[in-house]
Amino acid sequence: MKRKSSQRRGAVLLMALICLTLLVMFGASLLKLALMERKALESRQQTSQARRLAEAGFERAAARLADDPAYRGETWSLSGDEAVSGRPAAVTIEVGIVDDHPDRRRIMVQADYPSDAATRARQSKQGEFNLANPGDAS
């Protein structure tokens, strides 16, 4: 009689241990999924910010060219205080003359956000600017 009772307790303990192990594994899977979602969301946010910075860099280049046709570009660095979420950013602007069109400039912009991280988002934009008609930037 004692032996059956002892076996029953052992079986119940084993079942409880198996259930606990399954619950821990399920919880760990949920945690891993949540961390992956957070990383994907952060990546989308960084890409979106880099895209906005590339657009701003293009507009900055067009405005500078309207004031100074000799403008050739710059690296526009935003410190953590100036950028979104306190993360620094870098926008590289290059301006060149379009072949066979001395009154047109090619603007190439590359934005990195955040610029201080190993994994960062990089977006580029390029187009042309007409010095004769400053409203014609494409």
Image: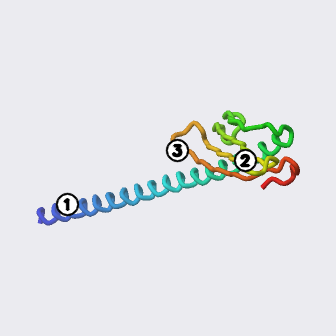
Q: Circle 3: is it few (<14), some (14-19), or many (20+) Cα within 10 Å?
A: few
Disc 1 or disc 3, which is closer to the eye? Answer: 3
Q: How is the image coloured?
A: rainbow
Vertical position of residue 118 compared to residue 51: above or below: above
Ranked by sequence position, the earlier of labels 2 and 3 is 2
Disc 1 marks which amino acid?
Answer: Gly
Q: CA distance from mark 1 to mark 2?
A: 76 Å
Nearer the observer, 18 or 101:
101
Q: Amino acid at mark 2?
A: Ile
Q: Quadrant of residue 97?
A: top right
* Residue 10: assigned label: 1
Q: Amino acid at mark 3?
A: Thr
> According to the image, label 2 marks what residue?
107
Q: Where is residue 9 drawn, in percent x and y? A: 21, 61
Please name the residue shown 41% across and 58% down the image: 29
Q: Which residue is mark 3?
A: 119
